[in-house]
Image (cartoon, rainbow, N blue to C red):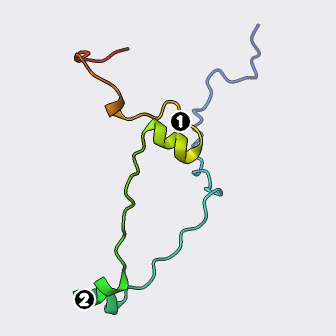
Amino acid sequence: MKDVTLPQKHALVSIALKRPPAPRDIHSPTPLPLPPAKDEVAHAAPDDKESKYRPVRKREVIRRSAEEEKEVYGRTFVGCGNQSDYSVTTKLGEGTFG
């Protein structure tokens, strides 16, 4: 048996949900401001730019045979070989393996 004191129809209720804010990025430091642009650098002559920096010299790669490694380091490095140490007789094939 229904209770007669309760209304038969209810009013339409609308609840507006707000989107939560983005999480705070507390793990990264705040970014530093960019330094002001200097007019001296923009209008410098090419001769001045070259004199400020010294050229970078790359080291030559030393390639030693297994016997030379044994003599220099007192041991040989297993698994560290040159491609010239192997003789390739036939082509293996093309495509993906796996």
Residue 1, relative to residue 89: is it above or below?
A: above
Q: What's the residue at 57%, 32% (across, down)?
A: 12
The three-letter amino acid code for the residue at tag 1 is: Phe
- Classify residue 1 as left or right of residue 38: right
Residue 26, relative to residue 63: is it above or below?
A: below
Give the Cα distance between marks 2 and 1.
Answer: 48 Å
The three-letter amino acid code for the residue at tag 2 is: Asp
Residue 35, relative to residue 91: is it above or below?
A: below
Q: In which quarter of the image is the N terminus?
A: top right
Q: What's the residue at 57%, 43% (across, down)?
A: 16
Give SS at disc 2.
helix
Q: Is residue 18 visible?
A: no
The nearer-to-camera label among 2 and 1 is 1
Residue for badge 2? 47
Residue 10, relative to residue 29: is it above or below?
A: above
Using the image as rendered, state which of residue 38 and residue 51 is in the foreground: 51
Quarter location, residue 39: bottom left
- Classify residue 28 as left or right of residue 56: right
Q: Around disc 1, counting alpha carbons within 10 Å, would you say few (fewer than 14), some (14 to 19), or many (20 or more)?
A: few
Please state the horizontal and vertical placement of residue 65, each as a whole percent of the image.
42, 39
Q: Around disc 2, counting alpha carbons within 10 Å, would you say few (fewer than 14), some (14 to 19), or many (20 or more)?
A: few
Using the image as rendered, state which of residue 3 and residue 40 is in the foreground: 40
- Classify residue 83 as left or right of residue 4: left
**CB atoms at circles 2 and 1 under 8 Å apart?**
no
Please state the horizontal and vertical placement of residue 69, each as a whole percent of the image.
50, 42
Q: Can residue 29 be seen in this view?
A: yes
Give SS at disc 1.
loop
Q: Residue 77 carries which label?
A: 1
Quarter location, residue 5: top right
Using the image as rendered, state which of residue 18 and residue 40 is in the foreground: 40
